[in-house]
Amino acid sequence: MRTSGAILALLALWVCLGVHGFSQEHWVWQNPLPQGNSLNDMQVFDAAHFLAVGDAGTVMRTSDGGVSWDIRFRTAGISGDLNAIYFFDQQTGYAVGDDGTILFTADGGESWIQQTSNSSADLLACHFSHPDTGTVVGAGGTILHTFDGGATWLLQTPPRQFDLHDVFFVTSSRGFVVGEGNAQTGATLLRTLDGG
């Protein structure tokens, strides 16, 4: 009796595993080997062209909808993580990352130029309302702003020192920043009506 119960249990397990093994998956692995670094942000330009950034200065680009990838590590000599990107068009964009990293590209991510941020904070998000006017936010309440396409970055004094995770401008003057908080103050939500 015990033997037939064990055989029946093994048969049921085999059927369950077999059904799972043959079931159709909804997601297909697109992270090409040998690239194993985490990816933190992505910009989609159209159905065929997009770019992603991630840990260890990783930049990945595709022009065929993800079938093949151009992968770069330690982009512009950066070994820290790249956390966010923002592009105006398929050619012109910025990437921000750990240790105050701000990178600029004018050729769709083929090459990157490091800009001087005057910050050592981990930068977590960026948004540009115009090719020359942008805001970057990050750890410890860091807010950086440029009016000259990143030639200079101005450190602004935030009303709170919590990590800031995202920034978005509805118009060139009206923008929002969101981030962490604590039990006493709640989450951080900042607003500007004068461009920062």
Image (cartoon, rainbow, N blue to C red):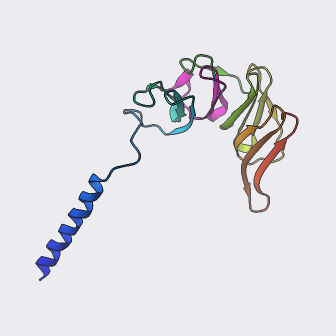
Position of residue 109 measured from the top left corner of the image (x, y, whole percent):
56, 21
To which quarter of the image does residue 68 belong?
A: top left
Quadrant location of the N terminus?
A: bottom left
- Count of labels in the image: 0
Asked if residue 97 lies left or right of residue 68, the reply is right
Position of residue 141 measured from the top left corner of the image (x, y, whole percent):
75, 43
From this viewpoint, is residue 36 visible? yes
Q: Residue furthest bottom?
A: 1
Position of residue 51 measured from the top left corner of the image (x, y, whole percent):
53, 29
In the foreground, 142 or 109: 109
Residue 87 magenta: yes
To which quarter of the image does residue 29 belong?
A: top left
Residue, x 54% and y 29% (percent of image)? 46
Asked if residue 97 lies left or right of residue 32, the reply is right
Residue, x 72% and y 48% (percent of image)? 179
Residue, x 30% and y 57% (percent of image)? 20
